[in-house]
Image (tube, rainbow, N blue to C red):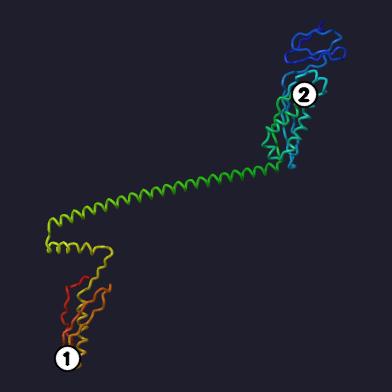
Amino acid sequence: MAKSIRIVPQQQAYIVERLGRYRKTLGAGLNFLVPVIDSVRAKVDLRERVVSFPPQPVITSDNLVVSIDTVLYYQVTNPADATYNIENYLQGVEQLTVTTLRNVVGSLDLEKALTSRDEINRALRVVLDEATGKWGIKVTRVEIKAIEPPPSIRDSMEKQMRAERDRRAAILTAEGVKQSQILNAEGEQQAAILRAQGSRQARVLEAEGQAKAIKEVFDAIHAANPDEKLLAYQYLQTLPQIAAGPANKIWMIPAELTRALDSFSGAMSGLGLGGGGEKAAPAKAEAPPVEGGERAIEAHALPVPQEAPEPVPAPVERRAEGDVR
């Protein structure tokens, strides 16, 4: 009686044989067997299971050996097929996964394999579903945990990534400097335009003010009807302002220079008499040109007697002591 009653847990299935031949599959709950004739061949777990396979070396299309770790999710859908169609379905799934992974990754280069995990997972799932369908197993998901290239390749990849990051950083820095210079140039341009506009408006207003002032002065002068003496007085008052300009040059001619020129002209006149006692004709000596080349000082000499020890300088007609030109 004890052997004829079997209680099957949830999500499990018992394969029952009668006299060595498949009889039925017991589901969850209370089941009865015929003693001695019926026996339980296998107990199959119907839950989804996860299997992690050890790293497998795979050669890529560019002849690089990479190590790939895979994780497989599967579920038994037909306990009888999983029991009778394959001896060890877990081992069969593992070997099928390895061979399929080598076929899929072998057609890709290293860079493509590292960036195409979804495509590899999809290709593995399609192949495994087709092969494990007759085993009563359904592969629900295949995931690649890691793809490890050789150490030398990893170093090269790190250098390449570092160079790429440096290049991007340099590009971003250059773009930032470019934008900064453009903004500075635009700011300087706007500032120069605004300064020019302000200067133009200021000059226009200043010119308008000067024109208005000149017009008012002109109208006031004509309304007052001034005489010549008043105009001459105003002119004399304006002369210092005209001479005070930075473009004008003022030359100071001292009185001692005129006296020296007078003495020199008198001596030359005495030498021209020749001892005859006649009066020498008045000599006209030209003073050296004053710096500026605009005018010269004229000096006149009077006749000097021969017996005189030295010529007496004649008075020179000059405008004032310390002529200013």
User: Where is 133 relative to 228, above or below?
Assistant: above
Q: Residues within 10 Å of mark 2 (few under 14, many from 20)?
A: some
At label 1, the amino acid type is Gln
User: Relative to 31, is 181 on the left or the right?
Assistant: left
Could you tell me residue 103's position as x and y percent? 76, 35
Q: Secondary structure at mark 2?
A: helix
User: Relative to 311, is 156 on the left or the right?
Assistant: right
Q: Secondary structure at mark 1?
A: loop
Quarter of the image for the N terminus: give it: top right
Q: Residues within 10 Å of mark 1 (few under 14, many from 20)?
A: some
User: Where is 75 relative to 258, above or below?
Assistant: above
Could you tell me residue 67's position as x and y percent? 73, 36
Query: Residue at position x 21%, y 53% from top?
Result: 213
Could you tell me residue 325's position as x and y percent? 22, 70
Residue, far bottom: 276
User: Where is 107 relative to 19, above or below?
Assistant: below
Residue 185's disc number: none
Residue, far right: 19
Which residue was labeled with disc 2? 133
Could you tell me residue 90's position as x and y percent? 78, 25
At label 2, the amino acid type is Gly
Which residue was labeled with disc 1? 306
Query: Residue at position x 26%, y 73% from top?
Result: 294
- Do callouts 2 and 1 mark residues in contact (Cβ within 8 Å)? no
Pick whichever, 226 or 119, lies toward us.
226
Query: Residue at position x 13%, y 55% from top?
Result: 223
First along the sequence among labels 2 and 1: 2
